[in-house]
Image (cartoon, rainbow, N blue to C red):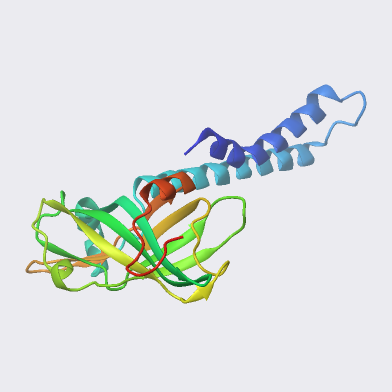
Amino acid sequence: MTSLTRSRYLALPFVVTSTYWVLDHLLPDILPKPPKPVSWSIVACAASLLLIALIVMGWRRLVDWMPRPWFPSPFWRVASWLRCRPTVSVVTVIPQASIVDGRMEECVIHVTLVRSLAQMPVDAVVRFDATTLILQRTDQRGSTRHVFRPKETGGFLMRPIAAGSLDSILIDFAATGLPARFPDAPDFDGDYEIAITGIRVEARSDRPFGGKLPPVKWQMCRAAYQANLSAPLSGNAAF
């Protein structure tokens, strides 16, 4: 958590406390001193706001340290799940598109992921059949959101991964809602954030359990896009 975020949470309690201190100590000759009930009310308000700010800050620290969702199936194995929960991280992101007559016919994002079962005591399957990739603009040019789905989720992706191991895979995510004309289609002409949600892990054991993993995020700026842009799809031009 950055110092800017902490300052934002503590700003309101600080303003209330500072106002009371000014009224009580600096302006007694100009303004009447607040009566004790009012003073106690201001102090209680400031203390309550400070407590709420500390709770929110603590909650955000907890979520940053251990991202949600937390509960597996069955839910009573939550302690074991959080202790050994696998991780998935993004290594590379390469967008690719085909455009015909100013209309985007197809858009695919090639994502290289690392699947890690470093803490997992048993073999497990990392499933992507319910996965969604969200492409969200993060610059000042406006707010756009595009949805991508994996083109293939079976085959080797459904093979169990050995406990304590890791590997890398390449998954192609295709945009939904195409063909479409600009600006309704993804154009990557700006800064974006990619979030992959819905990844599920199923442990293979005598007492099977599993659950969803936290969203996997990747910041993609225009410079990175231009450096990593792949060759056009066969027979079409890339944008």
**Residue at 15 percent of width and 51 percent of height:** 166
Q: Within the image, what quadrant is residue 44 found in?
A: top right
| Residue 108 percent coordinates (x, y) | 36, 66
Position of 125 with respect to 132 (left or right) is left
| Residue 15 percent coordinates (x, y) | 71, 36
**Residue at 21 percent of width and 51 percent of height:** 83
Q: Nearer the viewer, residue 145 or 186?
A: 186
**Residue at 16 percent of width and 70 percent of height:** 158
Image vertical order of residue 147 relative to residue 136, above or below: below
| Residue 36 percent coordinates (x, y) | 78, 36
Position of 188 with respect to 164 (left or right) is right
Q: Is residue 121 visible?
A: yes
Q: Nearer the viewer, residue 189 or 21?
A: 189
| Residue 197 percent coordinates (x, y) | 36, 64
Q: Nearer the viewer, residue 90 or 221?
A: 221
Q: Is residue 198 visible?
A: no
Image vertical order of residue 69 relative to residue 19, above or below: below
Q: Within the image, what quadrant is residue 149 found in?
A: bottom left
Position of 24 with respect to 76 (left or right) is right
Position of 218 with respect to 35 (left or right) is left
